[in-house]
Image (cartoon, rainbow, N blue to C red):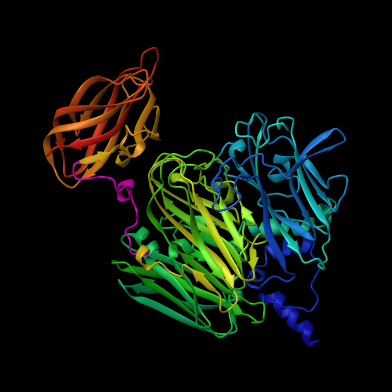
Amino acid sequence: MKRVFVILIGLLIGLPYAGHAEPEVSLASLLREMTDRTQIALFPAPTFECRQFSSYDRASIARDSAGWFANWDRSMFLRVERDRGRTEYVMMDAAGPGAVVRFWMTFAGENCGRGTLRIYVDDMSEPIVEGAAFDILSGGKLAGAPLCASVSELTPYEQRGHNLYFPIPYAERCKVTYESEHVYEDDFGAKESRSECVYYNINYRTYAPSTKVRSFRMEQLQQHAALIARTQRLLSDGKACMDAGRFERCGMDAVLAPGKKHTVSLSGGNAVRRIRMHLAAEDREQALRSVVLQIRFDGEQTVWIPVGAFFGIGDRSLTTSTWYTSVDDSGLMEAYWVMPFEKECVITLENYGTQSVQITDAAVEYAPWHWNERSMHFGAAWHEYAGIDTGSSKTMDGQGRGLRDLSFVHLTGQGVYVGDEISLFNTTYHWWGEGDEKIFVDGEPFPSHIGTGTEDYYGYAWCRPERFTGHPFIAQPCGDGNFAPTFSVNSRWRVLDAIPFRKSLDFDMELWHWAHGHINYAPATFWYLRPGGTADPASDPDAVVRTVTKCRSDIIPDKTRLSVAAEAMNVEGTPAGHVEYNPLHTDQLSGEVSLYWTNAPSGTVMETTFHSDWECSGPVTVRLVKAPEFGRVNIRLNGVLLTQEVDLYASDFQVVKFVFENGVLRCGENRLTFEITAPAPSRETGGCGCDLIVFEK
């Protein structure tokens, strides 16, 4: 009777109960696990490994190999099978017992994504799931949103990432194939493929051989219809699951002067269930970075992270709504991670900045927890790679200056990896995230998780900048910096696709930027560890005191007192035509980059701005680009005409130096303006290119 009572109380208040017999893994058990936040704070039972099949470039074979950064990440299959007149391309083939727990795809090419996706279970000759890929992944064939969803809804459907989080357990084996008349066997994976391009990432669990797993069948959709509907409802609004009446509450309101801390302590036998606060300051974005949340569990500091990163918005005033984080229009920030501890929890907010910060509506909510041999401490860390040079333009074979692996985190001990966020400031009009995740578990020589691009890892596709949130496990509350010199933030939370490890976990992400420039790149990582585990890096106090980047001139280091490179100029607004910072392998250009404006009609204007710490007047040298797309332009500096109708047409690319006598440089902001006066010969549009401007004092 006593045992029954303990189980009942555990169900009512979220108190984890560790029974002696391992339960059967099934669709129902996995769906319940998805919405039980307490389970992720316990080392898994039954135990499993989480791994990934993907279409990564097979030239990536070792860190010291020439193809380690190769980027032909599509239409790479395990093999081709022919059966009953069908040609099926195998994407996954795994021995069980196991479960598919996350399935992402996107496509390119004519009629793409309309081929037939098949999922076979337990050596069955017929698939248990069959249909058009879009229908299965995001079209509702298995379930509704958010278990089946595509993002962003603002993005054209064919350019979205298609995400299936509906779990598919199997007792013996699972095989996934794709059939399409637009994929050609003689060139799939080729560098110049004429096939439909197929990109995929499949995360799956493999349980110990003795684990009992009930394989998925389509009739279970009807059997578990109520549970599926409940799961979708709970995941769609993570905040609605939090019944405040169930938890004790400890207030955390404070006014933090520069350099000051505010600390609260909780006694043992509990678990933090929610942390919430408003944050106000004259410069709120700086405060989101400079106020750091620190938590010690049972004497071990495992959390050191700026509050903005902890709540999923980086250092910008954004909104978001996921399973673990929420920031609403009022700026109320909430996090729902379960954080158990045996003896004591000490939570500190520290202001590393130079301004006073007010913390209001702040509270820590907690509930009883029975600490046992499976319980783990929550951890989170953040650090920044500031002003890193992205190198020259690259080739798809993974050659070019600037390619490197950025370390997100190195964890030692026994634990589970549960999510990450990146916030960054881009300084070009080119995509920054071509790089793949590489996750090494327990010292494995080759990563068991290697992907197809940063945006694919975060659930969207094609570097699209459209905002999306409201999905439980992925979010892009801001994507403005994906194609422009400004800010972006992406996050991914793991539940069924969390990664257990027994000795260590190393998470690297390739820095694979399409253009030469500089970037501020800050990863935040989240995990659970048994006591005694460690994380590297543990903190980055030098980074949180840096001024938050507001514009690209805060990062670009290649300005000198007498010259400004075109890649250090900000393009104002959105001029007609097409504007880019164009990387070229040529020593004609300073830094191998030019500001390139094309397809602009006559009479249109492009304004650029740059900053100077001094002023002068007199001769100014402008290095301009000539090209077949260009015609005639007027050029003004701070409203003064430097030249009228200079002809920038040439039959091939050239960089030409012009010296103008009437330059006026201001201290502060300066404006360099280009006006199209005539199109290129035999064209209806024109343009211009600029490499460098030099002043002589």
Dividing the image into 4 quarters, which one contains the C terminus? top left
Quarter of the figure with the N terminus: bottom right
Residue 553 lies in magenta, yes or no?
yes
- Using the rendered view, name the quadrant where residue 656 is placed: top left
> From where the camera sits, is residue 332 visible?
no
| Place of residue 410 in the rendered image (x, y in percent of width and height, measured from the top left) | 53, 66
Residue at x 37% of width, y 63% of height: 543
The percent position of residue 583, horizontal first and vertical second, equals 40, 36
Q: Based on the displayed image, in which of its 4 quarters is residue 492 positioned?
A: bottom right
Residue at (38, 74) in percent of width and height: 254
Most extreme residue toward the top is: 682
- Principal secondary structure, stretch drawn in magenta: loop
As drawn, 101 above or below 55: below
Say above or below: 359 vs 224.
below
Comparing 183 with 684, the one in front is: 183
Residue 111 figure quarter:
top right
Specify whether residue 636 is painted magenta. no
Left or right position of 183 against 271:
right
Which is more toward the observer, 194 or 68? 68
Q: Which residues are magenta?
A: 544-562
Front-lying residue, 250 or 202: 202
Residue at position x 62%, y 56% in the image = 446
Q: Nearer the viewer, residue 148 or 512?
A: 512
Q: Is residue 430 above or below residue 443?
A: above
**Residue 621 visible in this rendered orientation of the protein:** yes
Q: What residue is drawn where x is 83% and y is 66%?
A: 212
Image x and y of residue 452, in percent? 59, 46
Q: Is residue 15 left or right of residue 461?
A: right
